[in-house]
Image: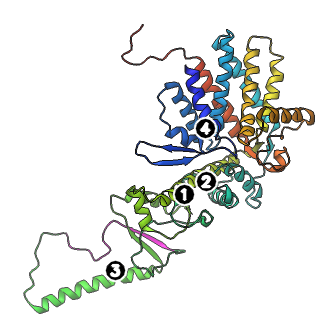
Amino acid sequence: SHIMAAKAVASTLRTSLGPNGLDKMMVDKDGEVTVTNDGATILNMMDVDHQIAKLMVELAKSQDDEIGDGTTGVVVLAGALLEQAEQLLDRGIHPIRIADGYEQAARIAIEHLDKISDSFPVDPQNIEPLIQTAKTTLGSKVVNRCHRQMAEIAVNAVLTVADMERKDVDFELIKVQGKVGGRLEDTQLVKGVIVDKDFSHPQMPKELKDVKIAILTCPFEPPKPKTKHKLDVTSVDDYKALQKYEKEKFEEMVKQKLQLKKMLAFKSWCFVSCKYSRLKTLQRKFLSFLITDLTNNTEMIHIFLFFLCHWMSNILYFEIIEEAKRSLHDALCVIRNLVRDNRIVYGGGAAEISCALAVSEAADKCPSLEQYAVRAFADALEVIPMALSENSGMNPIQTMTEVRARQVKENNPALGIDCLQKGTNDMKQQHVIETLIGKKQQISLATQVVRMILKIDDIRRPGESEE
């Protein structure tokens, strides 16, 4: 039952794998609809009751937190490993021997990934290779019709805030903002701070450069005396003197503001101050970008706040924005991973097929009972390219067999599934690239979760009898 629960979660995500993967429509308890093919988002919104299935959800979260991409693949791989383990259990092999064999096979696969990996140039002066990598990530997303533009934005955003000496990227310096109205092609990169506030006057400039920012938690007016004392005005001269004093103080405040030349001032009351908490560190270089037009359509935004769902077109715009933000997050994570470690492997299932061949060859040399588990691990790795070909409308077994035979014959680990029908199976020519640390993390996390599940033989809940 444990394996069945985990396999059910994996089978749900299998059809969303790859550039031709299908989307899922997720409906929450409030009836709000989310359309996505992001594995972490799908699992996060699924109503999962079984404790073992929840481990698969945590698996996707771990991949998303560590790498940011490959969440669907890691769950599909874990499901395939459990399916192979089920067959071995039916043949009478102990789960501990299966778990040990899987760990041994994972070690072989990760070592083989190091051998077939290529060094990738991360040069701020030549960003084209990075753009091609980001396009691979965005190819299966809703933004694929303008994925070149989105890839350029992601690359420029990461390189602007990246510390190339320390090989680190602080994502706190990158903010993704979305606005309803316009098209995805209107997306732009803003190297500065975006303030989501209404204009006090329609003729105010929409863009300010080299500007001083004032964040006010009080009214923009002369201060009022906070005292309980009374001021008695007994004559016209006293009143005029008081009026003159207030006018002089007000003019003094205005002159101080005028001396600042360019200044952006906006009020931030206590109930929205959290939105501007990141502005406390204005001395740092901030980066932000908008999904759609900078023009603010207040009426449309209020429709979402009050959930007036009969405005279906506006709801769809909002969903596209949210999915585009998730897609950009994946692309940003991939570029960040390349800054940290510039080694890559080739996608389209090429790395999995090559690892499967290496693991299968090692299984023949294994003298112990773990040989069956090692060979089962190799079979599970081939599920990824089979799912890619199946989702692309091909015959999965025939396509995968042909590519595997060509890899052995040509000794080329870059041969994968031609999902986009470009006429070549060489993923190096197609620029279908995945980060080495992302692929290693997929295999490592999937193996750890499967070993954990195999070692669980019972689930006890509070209040259940010992019988």
Q: Which amino acid does label 4 sit on?
A: Gln
Q: Where is residue 13 in the image (x, y as percent from the top left)?
A: 61, 37
Q: Please state if 159 lies on the left or on the right of 406 as rendered.
A: left
Q: Mark 2 points at which residue?
A: 328
- Asked if the magenta segment contains residue 221, the reply would be yes
Q: Residue at x 67, y 40 (%)?
A: 17
Looking at the image, the residue that sits furthest to the right is 409
- Disc 3 + disc 1, Cβ < 8 Å: no
Question: In this figure, which colouring scheme has been used for the structure?
Answer: rainbow
Q: Mark 1 points at which residue?
A: 176
Looking at the image, the residue that sits furthest to the top is 467
Disc 2 from disc 1: Cα separation: 8 Å
Which label sits on residue 63?
A: 4
Q: In which quarter of the image is residue 112?
A: top right
Where disc 2 sits, the SS reads helix
Residue 257 in sight: yes
Which label sits on residue 253?
A: 3
Q: Where is residue 312 in the image (x, y as percent from the top left)?
A: 47, 58
Q: Main secondary structure of the magenta part?
A: loop
Q: Which quadrant is home to the C terminus?
A: top left
Disc 4 from disc 2: Cα separation: 16 Å
The residue closer to the viewer here, 105 or 310, is 310
The residue closer to the viewer here, 108 or 188, is 188
Magenta part of the chain: 211-226
Q: Please state if 314 lies on the left or on the right of 126 as rendered.
A: left
The residue closer to the viewer here, 129 or 79, is 79
Where disc 1 sits, the SS reads strand
Dot placed on the residue nearer the N-terminal end, 2 or 1: 1
Vertical arrangement, residue 213 with respect to residue 423, above or below: below
Q: Residue at x 49, y 25 (%)?
A: 51
Q: Where is residue 271 in the image (x, y as percent from the top left)?
A: 33, 58
Q: Residue at x 50, y 15 (%)?
A: 458
